Image (cartoon, rainbow, N blue to C red):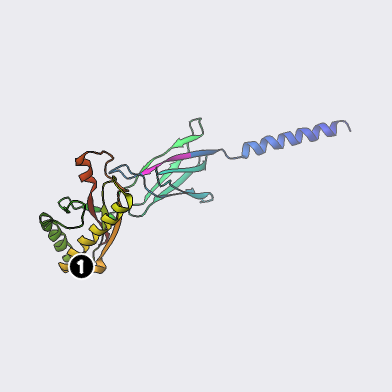
Amino acid sequence: MFLRPILALLLVSLCTQVIAQDQDKMIRVTGTVTDPNDNKAILASVFYEKLPYYDDMGVSKTNQSNGVYELYMIENQKYILNVKADGYKTISEEFVVTDKGIGLIEKNFKMEPDAMHEKISLDNLIFARGKSVITPESYEELDALADWLDQRPNTIIQLEGHTDFQGNAQANLELSEERVLAVKEYLIKKGIKKSRIRTKAFGGTEPLTRERTPEARTKNRRVEVRIIQQ
């Protein structure tokens, strides 16, 4: 009778050890998803599926401000990772969760822009200071864009307007909108259907540089052409 409680305790202890050994160790996998051209953060989804049976899966969305994602995956297991974002080529690769004793793995991704969504900068497009009036020296570049579109009747573009980040934010947004609308109107007058031209205004929210020199401000004031459909 005396041995039964002891045997019961030993059995419980043994079962506890077996369960503990069977529990999977979870490893934190984190990193950033960025554009290789300017290192800007990308709003993306990082999907994971455990191979070969796809019996463990999930997704993490990146932080819009810094491109950071975070996953928890089983140690020593092989997964397939798929990174997806609008305007970028999907990344798909196999990944073995190999921990180095710290319970953390850093894995960063650089996403190549999809050719269907690449941007073209109109470097010679100039507006009157603080206005949406297109200056005559801009006509040659806009005429070339109109000819390019005329030769590609199925292409749809989006004109994206930017200002520098100094001054009133609302005024900058309105100015960038007026400028892309002015470019759209110019292209329509050249025979391009308005249904093929979308517009989007950013104001000063997406500067190319944070410097405050006159040259930097000029660089930030721009209109870009994004190819939506070819």
Residue 141 appears anywhere in the view: yes
Residue 27, given in percent of the width and then of the height, sits at 52, 38
Could you say which is closer to the camera, residue 6 or residue 100? 100
| Magenta stretch contains residue 31 | yes
Q: What are the residue bounds of the magenta stretch?
A: 29-33
Could you say which is closer to the camera, residue 104 or residue 184? 184
Residue receiving disc 1: 153
Q: In which quadrant of the rendered view does residue 156 lie?
A: bottom left
What residue is drawn where x is 33% and y is 47%? 111
Residue 228, given in percent of the width and then of the height, sits at 28, 60
Residue 52 appears anywhere in the view: no
Residue 164, given in percent of the width and then of the height, sits at 26, 46
| Magenta stretch contains residue 11 | no
Main secondary-structure element of the magenta-colored stretch: strand
What residue is drawn where x is 14% and y is 63%? 147
Locate the N terminus by quadrant.
top right
What residue is drawn where x is 17% and y is 58%? 133
Q: In which quadrant of the rendered view does residue 17 lie?
A: top right
Is 174 situated above or below 213? below
Whether residue 36 sits left or right of residue 134 in the image: it is right
Could you say which is closer to the camera, residue 38 or residue 214? 214
Kindly identify the amino acid type of the residue bearing the numbered disc 1.
Pro
